[in-house]
Amino acid sequence: MAEEPQGAQHSAVELQIVRYRAVLAVRQNSSDGRLWRWSAIAVHDRTGGVIQASDAETAVLEALVALHGEWLRLTPLDIAVDLSQSSRFWQLDVSTALSGLSVRPVRRKYDGKLLDEARKAIGEAKPDEGHTSSSAENPGPQAQTWQVATDGSVRGSFTGWGWMATNGMFGLLGFRNDLRLIGADAVAVAEIRAIGDAIRRIPAAKLEIYTDSRRAIELIQEWQEGGDRLPAGYTTARRPGKIAGLVRIQELVGSNASRVSVHWVRGHSGHLLNEGADSLAKMARRHAERLDGRTTAQLHTHAADLAEAFLRAHSQSTESTSQNTSADRRR
């Protein structure tokens, strides 16, 4: 979503780390060798079932086809597969056949918790169990409402933005800005870019978006009602063939008005999603400034770990609040 201002020198990290990460595990049925149980576990979703296959590699392929169809709207998907790195499976070009899927071996340090849950799920499945839909605790992607927090970080001529959602997805981008094109309110512009990217990357679902920028909220709500006002000083002049980023976001917000609501949250007040988005925005900006000493691959891993930690803490906090509320009602 980030525009490329004319004449700007980008040290942009076009991360768009907005992928839905899951671990896939398979296990042969002990009573019928033709059947294989499979389970895919993400931060807030899980699914699985039983398929027929001649070996583990075929079982993984069949499971990936099923998973691709079920979670298609969540692509791009980053799938860690519980197979030995010496398996012939890794000779296959799965990503070409199943667009939107990035498949890789499990990394224990990175995927350990999800891997343990996936293995546990197939270990406890009943032999005759068919496809299992997502549980109430871990809802699937159908007809969902997700919470999204966004934030922007600006220092001098460098901008970063980030967002994370309760379905496990997140995104961030860092780059050099040009105030001659975007005006003086670079923070609000960064917030709007983050909001636009989340809307684009999470189609169909209803989104409750939380931001600490009242100016961003004001503009988004105007665009939802058909307005076209832009931040003060923001220009739409771009090189031939390019459309200003906020103009594209205007159109996106207008066409998705019925499924998006925006809400204000006080910054740095302990709102875990907002704190996570703030950390991602600062991380992206610092990387663009070349202050973090990380490679892009290292940044990717660090951002994914950070997002998962904040999302897990948010989920635990929400669950604790819900339990306390239920207890109070029973008194």
Image (cartoon, rainbow, N blue to C red):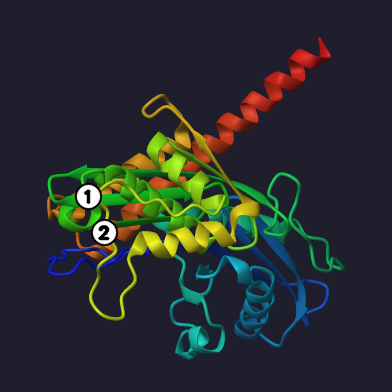
196 shown above or below 10: above
Q: In this view, does 262 lie to the left or right of 110?
A: right
Amino acid type at image mark 1: Gly
**Numbered tag placed on residue 183 in the rendering:** 1
Q: How many labels does the image show?
A: 2
Task: Kindly tell me whether residue 213 is visible in this rendering.
Answer: no
Residue 104, percent from left and from top = 45, 74
Q: Is residue 222 left or right of residue 290?
A: right
Q: In this view, does 288 lie to the left or right of 204?
A: left
Camera-nearest residue between 146 and 242: 242
Mark 1, Cα crowd under 10 Å, few <14 / some 14-19 / many 20+, is some
Residue 193, percent from left and from top = 37, 54
Identified at 63% across, 80% down, the residue is 56
**Numbered tag placed on residue 33 in the rendering:** none
1 or 2: tag closer to the N-terminus: 1
Camera-nearest residue between 218 and 56: 218
Q: Do the residues labelled 1 and 2 touch (CB within 8 Å)?
A: yes
213 shown above or below 251: above
Splitting the image into 4 quarters, where does residue 236 fall?
A: bottom left
199 shown above or below 78: above
Residue 57, percent from left and from top = 60, 83
Residue underneath mark 2: 235
Q: In this view, does 218 lie to the left or right of 38?
A: left
